[in-house]
Image (cartoon, rainbow, N blue to C red):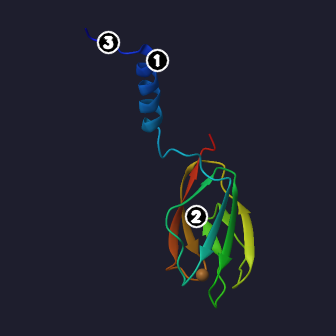
Amino acid sequence: MLKPISTSLIAAAAVLTLSAGCGGDDPPPAELTVDIEAYQFPDELSVAAGGEVVFTSADAEPHQIDLGDGAVVTDAFGSGERVMVEAPGEPATYDLICLLHPTMRGTVEVADAG
Ligand SMILES: [Cu+2]
């Protein structure tokens, strides 16, 4: 005689499948530190809309960062300094560019804090 499958086991399996489907959808961090080194931005930057973005540099020359085509512009900062700005409130992918080194380009993903 076949043993009936427990309904609670089926429910547990359904919950597992659901949470697996949402995997990798973590909320963006409220604070992002962008460590610039060798005149390059790190890859895969993300921050919550309106969050805090801190830039640091390990380079000999100062940098001055434009985030989002003029939406946010930092003061110029040198090696060992930290400048903090507020991320835009509108979720989008924003361009990063150094106004002092126009070849320095990157992007930052500003996402809804959820
Ligand atoms: Cu620069």
For disc 3, the neighbor class at 10 Å (few under 14, some 14 to 19, many from 20) is few
Confirm or deny contact between disc 2 and disc 1 (CB under 8 A): no
Name the residue that disc number 2 marks. Answer: 69
Name the spot of residue 30 as percent of width and height, x first. 68, 53
Q: From the viewer's perspective, is 79 left or right of 95? A: right
Residue type, numbered disc 1:
Ser
Please identify the quarter of the rendering in which residue 64 is found: bottom right
Confirm or deny contact between disc 2 and disc 3 (CB under 8 A): no
**Helix or strand or loop: what does disc 3 sit on?**
loop
Mark nearer the N terminus (2 vs 1): 1
Please identify the quarter of the rendering in which residue 66 is found: bottom right
**Helix or strand or loop: what does disc 2 sit on?**
loop
Name the residue that disc number 3 marks. Answer: 3
Confirm or deny contact between disc 3 and disc 1 (CB under 8 A): no
Give the quadrant of ligand 1. bottom right
Name the spot of residue 74 as percent of width and height, x first. 70, 71
Q: Work out whether residue 57 or residue 22 is closer to the camera in this orientation and state it.
A: 22
Q: Which mark is residue 8?
A: 1
Q: Residue at x 72, y 83 (%)?
A: 80
Name the spot of residue 2 as percent of width and height, x first. 27, 11
Q: From the viewer's perspective, is 83 left or right of 113? A: right
- Residue 63 vs 84, above or below: the answer is below
Q: Residue at x 74, y 72 (%)?
A: 83
- Residue 77 vs 6, above or below: the answer is below
